[in-house]
Amino acid sequence: MSEDEKYMRRCLQLAANGIQGARPNPMVGAVIVLLEENGGGRILGEGYHVRCGEAHAEVNAFASVKSADEALLKDATLYVSLEPCSHYGKTPPCADLVVRKGVRRVVVGTVDPFAEVQGRGIRKLQDAGIDVTVGVLEEECRWLNRRFFTYHSKHRPYIILKWAQTANGFIDDHGHALPISNEQTLMLSHQLRAEEDAILVGHTTNMREHPQLTVRHWYGPDPKRVVLTRQRPLPQLVDDLYQHGIQSLIVEGGRQTHESFITAGLWDEIRVETNLALTVGDGTRAPQLPAGATVYDSHCYFGHTIVRYVRA
């Protein structure tokens, strides 16, 4: 692992702390390092974007630098997981701050897809004579902010299809609701809800099960509740969510609801929980995974597996 990769991984660790507070802004981490010629380095400051409307990662990183180390900034490298902003929003442009601080070099994980930035921050740094490297751990940096990137590049929410199934592939018992999750996977399900903007069920599931769709087994904000009816075509629904600033959507409906999203090609991630010890004689079959779904990761929780799929 190179020095650049090492410190960019630290940026990603820091950025992830903003999973709830930063949105709808992206999660960003920044680390200021005084690199040594023979390898290694000393961290002078670090920070992340804690909450939307408050200081960005770069601002917090520079604020954490001790006064005795200020003179070292001219020889330091700033690592940041996302391109520094170049526009006035709720806070001033971070690119201007970086230029004023006079760091020697900036390493950027990935370019910001937001229309007000999109390379302008990088160009501002380069025009000021700063050495800029772009694309270190780019895939990981983009994955961390996959909701933000999807929203701004595809003009729709990042869509997660999620269901639980028995070992023999059913999602209910002869058409009746069936508890499939265990205590740990239920907590993980509610953690996911706390991290996403909205959650959707179909009309039938809503009428039959009256799901609460809250984060009562975790902590954080409840996602916005959405019910899909026959009168709401999916493209219109997804566009409405985009227009209302919804960056991510969990789909927890039944088979028909999931298959409507799959048929329309409206999915980015699929999470399937399987209770390996539970079987039923008959019921509603779990949805078929779409072509192109590839395993991203898989974990086992006391006899339950959760497999996460993404597009190939």
Image: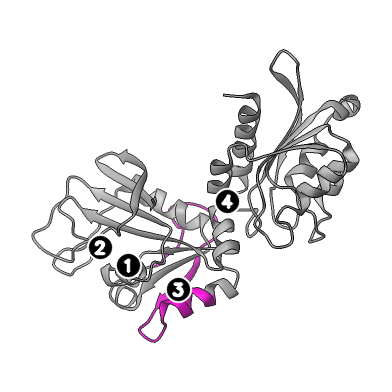
Q: Which mark is residue 87?
A: none
Q: Is residue 89 left or right of residue 7?
A: right
58 above or below 269? above
Which residue is denoted by mark 4 in the rendering?
Answer: 145
Judging from the image, what secondary structure is the residue with disc 4 in?
A: loop
Which residue is denoted by mark 3 in the rendering?
Answer: 226
118 above or below 49? below
In the rendered structure, which amino acid carries the disc numbered 3?
A: Val
Disc 4 from disc 1: Cα separation: 24 Å
In the rendered structure, which amino acid carries the disc numbered 4?
A: Asn
Pointers 3 and 1 in contact (C-beta within 8 Å): no
Callout 1: few (<14), some (14-19), or many (20+) C-alpha neighbours within 10 Å?
Answer: many
Q: Which residues are magenta?
A: 212-240
Judging from the image, what secondary structure is the residue with disc 1 in?
A: helix
Disc 2 from disc 4: Cα separation: 27 Å
Which residue is denoted by mark 1 in the rendering?
Answer: 258
In the rendered structure, which amino acid carries the disc numbered 1?
A: His
Residue 268, horizontal then vertical, whole percent: 43, 58
- First of labels 1, 2 by sequence position: 1
Residue 105, horizontal then vertical, whole percent: 79, 33
